Image: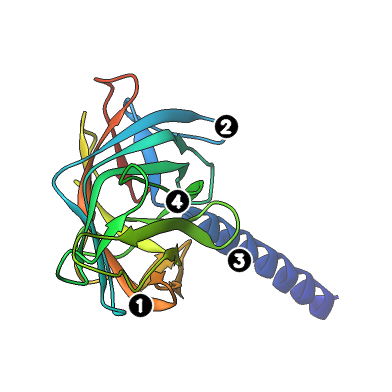
Amino acid sequence: MLKIGCAVLGALTLLVASGISASVASATGGPFWHAAGTKLFLNEARQIKLQSKGALVFKAQAGLEIECRNSISEGGVLEGSTTSQGQAKGRLLFSSCTVPIPAGAKCIVGGTAQIKTNPLKSYLAKAGQTNIVEVFEPGQGMVIAVVQLANGSGGTCPFKEVGIDGSTVAEVIPAEKEEQENLISFPSTAILKVVHEGTEVSLAPLKIIGFTAVFTGAYAARLANFPEKFGAFET
């Protein structure tokens, strides 16, 4: 009887420990979006608007650089969750875009000098100086955007249709604090590893026509129902 009792006790202890481990695991699901003093839970959402602060630059090792002076979000939505990381979705529209490299005005962005991404998705993770970042990826398929280039005044452009794929990561500033306006900043050194739901993962690097690239610049972020405050928190 004593042996059976010990076995039962051991089983109960294992179940309790497993329950504690599951609780700890579920608690590692952040960071989370907060708004108006509370965490956004499952099925809660906020419309968000991004507006560029200064120039935004795509730079590829293939010898291509595209600079856009203005950018805004379209259909941006923050989404809450009970256990997994805070998420978001939307598109980005870039305008007043030029091609500084190749040098000599060989290339221009075709049409209206605009770039519109495919639907994007993003999620919060841990990395960077603030320890809270937002990872941006294609919302469907593999391609972030396709850019049509044309010959400029300086000659023949060596690129025509340029695909952008992979992921890019921005630091959320400030972290652990709600503000009316937050900064979404893409650093010049790409962040390629993040802690996602308690596990370190390697991200697909940003690529332009198959070559490693980096996207730099920053956005001011506000909720559509401004001046409601919001921010990203680890818990």
From the top left corner, tell me how far across and down residue 6 is, in percent: 75, 75
Nearer the observer, 170 or 37 = 170
Q: Earlier along the polypeptide chain: callout 3 or callout 4?
A: 3
Asked if residue 84 is positioned above or below residue 190 in the image, the reply reads: above
Q: Residues within 10 Å of mark 3 (few under 14, many from 20)?
A: few
Q: Earlier along the polypeptide chain: callout 4 or callout 1?
A: 4
The residue that disc 2 covers is: 43
The residue that disc 3 covers is: 17
Q: Residues within 10 Å of mark 4 (few under 14, many from 20)?
A: many
Q: How far separated are the C-alphas under marks 2 and 1? A: 36 Å
Q: How far separated are the C-alphas under marks 3 and 2? A: 31 Å
Say which amino acid is labelled 2: Asn
- Mark 3 vs mark 1, foreground winner is 1
Say which amino acid is labelled 4: Ser
Q: Earlier along the polypeptide chain: callout 2 or callout 1?
A: 2
Q: How far separated are the C-alphas under marks 2 and 4? A: 16 Å
The residue that disc 1 covers is: 212
- Mark 3 vs mark 4, foreground winner is 4
Q: Earlier along the polypeptide chain: callout 3 or callout 2?
A: 3
From the top left corner, tell me how far across and down residue 184 is, in percent: 25, 48
Residue at image coords 67%, 70%: 14
The residue that disc 4 covers is: 122
